[in-house]
Every structure is written in structure tokens, then in C-alpha cells.
Image (cartoon, rainbow, N blue to C red):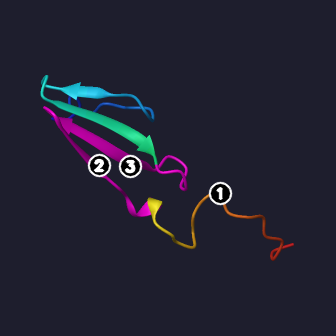
């Protein structure tokens, strides 16, 4: 049912849906593969920030830990 609706995007790759909505994933900078989103409709821009962009203690890449060695 949704197989024709899924679009795989790379960071900073724009996708226009129905000549109305433009979507752009932008790297969150902390988690591998995590994205923030820029949504553009007509002359308006909306930015969706994920919790991967806030100060959390489990960000990736994490510093090396030798606790298990």
C-alpha cells in the first residue's frame, strides 16, 4: 500500500512532493543517520529539530572508553 510513497533521501537531498511541499533532511550532527528536517511550503520554511540535536549524554560518536578492557 505505501511502497510507492517511500522515498530514501541522503542528507541535504531535496524531495518535492506534489509540486507543493519540499522536504530536506539535514544531519543532526550528533547521532549517525539522525536528521533534522527543513519543510518548505510556498514561501514558508519550517525546521523540525529532533532530540538528537539537544544536549544529551548518549550522543554519537562517543569518546573511547576502556572500562570493559
Seen at 35% across and 56% down, the residue is 49
Q: Position of residue 14 (x, y in %)?
A: 33, 28
How busy is the neighbourhood of tag 1: few (under 14 within 10 Å), some, or many (20 plus)? few
Residue 47: give its label.
Answer: 2
Mark 2 vs mark 3: give the one in front: 2
Secondary structure under the numbered disc 2 in the rendered image: strand
Which numbered disc flags the more N-terminal residue, 1 or 3?
A: 3
The answer for how far apart the CA atoms under marks 1 and 2 are is 24 Å
Q: Establish if 3 lies above or below 54.
A: above
Q: Are marks 2 and 3 in contact (CB under 8 Å)?
A: yes
Is residue 8 highlighted in magenta?
no
Q: CA distance from mark 1 to mark 3?
A: 17 Å
Q: Position of residue 28 (x, y in %)?
A: 47, 51
User: What segment is highlighted magenta in the picture?
Assistant: 28-52
Mark 2: few/some/many CA within 10 Å (<14, 14-19, 20+): some
- Mark 3, secondary structure of its residue: strand
Q: Which mark is residue 36?
A: 3
At a point 78% along the width and 70% down the height, the residue shown is 65
Toward which corner of the image does residue 64 lie, by quadrant?
A: bottom right
Residue 29 percent location from the top left of the image: 53, 51
Amino acid at each position: 500500500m505505501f511502497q510507492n510513497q517511500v522515498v530514501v533521501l541522503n542528507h541535504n537531498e531535496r524531495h518535492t512532493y506534489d509540486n507543493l511541499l519540499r522536504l530536506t533532511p539535514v544531519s543532526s550532527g550528533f547521532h549517525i543517520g539522525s536528521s533534522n528536517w527543513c519543510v518548505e511550503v510556498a514561501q514558508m520554511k519550517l525546521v523540525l529539530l529532533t532530540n538528537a540535536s539537544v544536549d544529551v549524554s548518549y550522543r554519537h560518536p562517543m569518546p573511547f572508553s576502556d572500562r570493559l578492557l
